[in-house]
Amino acid sequence: MAKTGFRIALAGGLAAALLLAARRAYDRRARERVVSHEGMDDPEIARAFNRVARLPQMRLLRWYVARRAAAMVQAGQAADLGCGPGYLVAALAQAAPGLQVTGIDLSDEMLLEAESYARRFGLQERVAFKKGDVVNIPFPDASLDLVVSTLSLHHWSNPAAVLDEIARVLRPGGSFLVFDLRRDMSAPFYLLLWFATHCVVPRALRHVREPLGSRDASFTPQEAAQLAGQSRLTGWRIAPGPLWLTIEGAMD
């Protein structure tokens, strides 16, 4: 009986200590936006991000975004801004066979990897990749039916200008879906990112404080609405989720 009582007391003490540590971590969270410096030009950091992108939870996220975007537009021309290794491009092409999808990224290395990834799924006839910057999307005015972007909004130095570019390249009635973390996520989700940053992700990402740094650099739904309101996007709405938000809609 004494041993049982000791074990119960020990377990209770450990639980209390963990709860106290979690509370302190949450209380120290950044309230105001802090610009992220992920260092994606560092090959080691880029490789670490790619390893994380292959995790099941990230595949589930891409499935969610691809299905949501495919429900908006089933056919036509689409672009993924900041496509990285092309995982979302492939998922979107698979979800909407009527779409021709172009991934856009600044990194030559990422574009080569994306092309290789698309070939693995036999998608090379339905997807393409271009080097380009989100502040100067390499498409003519009113030429796209859909623009998507995932977990890139918090990187943009001038988000309203990028939203203007999205508005420029979309045809009348064209749709957009900009998906990102939300900074005002609830305590359980914040602590999940805190735990991942300190205990789960590769060392290269821990050195740049990711993914928690992306949370700190992200926007609240109210801030996202202000950004969209400052841009030339029309027909937009903010759709908040428990961990994320989207700026989405169709141009009038």
Image (cartoon, rainbow, N blue to C red):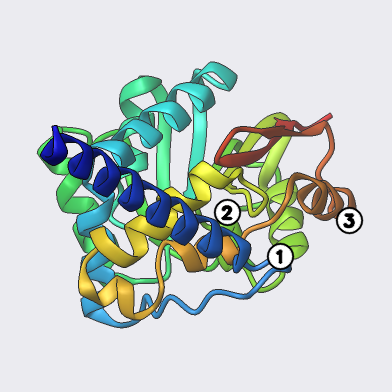
Location of residue 155 (image quadrant): bottom right
* Residue at (31, 52) in percent of width and height: 14
* Residue at 77 percent of width and 61 percent of height: 160
**Nearer mark to the viewer, of 1 and 3:** 1
Q: Check disc 3 and report the residue beneath it.
A: 230
Left or right of 117 in this view: 158 = right
Which residue lies under the disc numbered 2? Answer: 139
**Looking at the picture, which amino acid does disc 2 mark?**
Phe
Name the quarter where the C terminus is drawn.
top right
Callout 3: SS: helix
Residue 217: x percent and y percent?
Answer: 60, 66
Q: Residue at x 36, y 28 (%)?
A: 63
Q: Residues within 10 Å of mark 2 (few under 14, many from 20)?
A: some
> Three-letter amino acid code at disc 1?
Arg
Q: Is residue 23 above or below residue 135?
A: above
| Residue 43 vertical position relative to residue 135 in the rendered view, above or below | below
Percent of width and height locating residue 91: 32, 32
Q: Can residue 115 be seen in this view?
A: yes
Q: Which of marks 1 and 3 is nearer the N terminus?
A: 1
Q: What element carries label 1?
A: loop
Given this view, does label 1 or label 2 mark the residue nearer the observer?
1
Q: Where is residue 44 in the image (x, y as percent from the top left)?
A: 21, 78
Residue 31 is marked as 1
CA–CA distance between discs 1 and 3? 23 Å
* Dot 1 or dot 2, earlier in sequence: 1
Kindly indicate whether the residue at mark 2 contacts the one at mark 3 (C-beta within 8 angstroms).
no
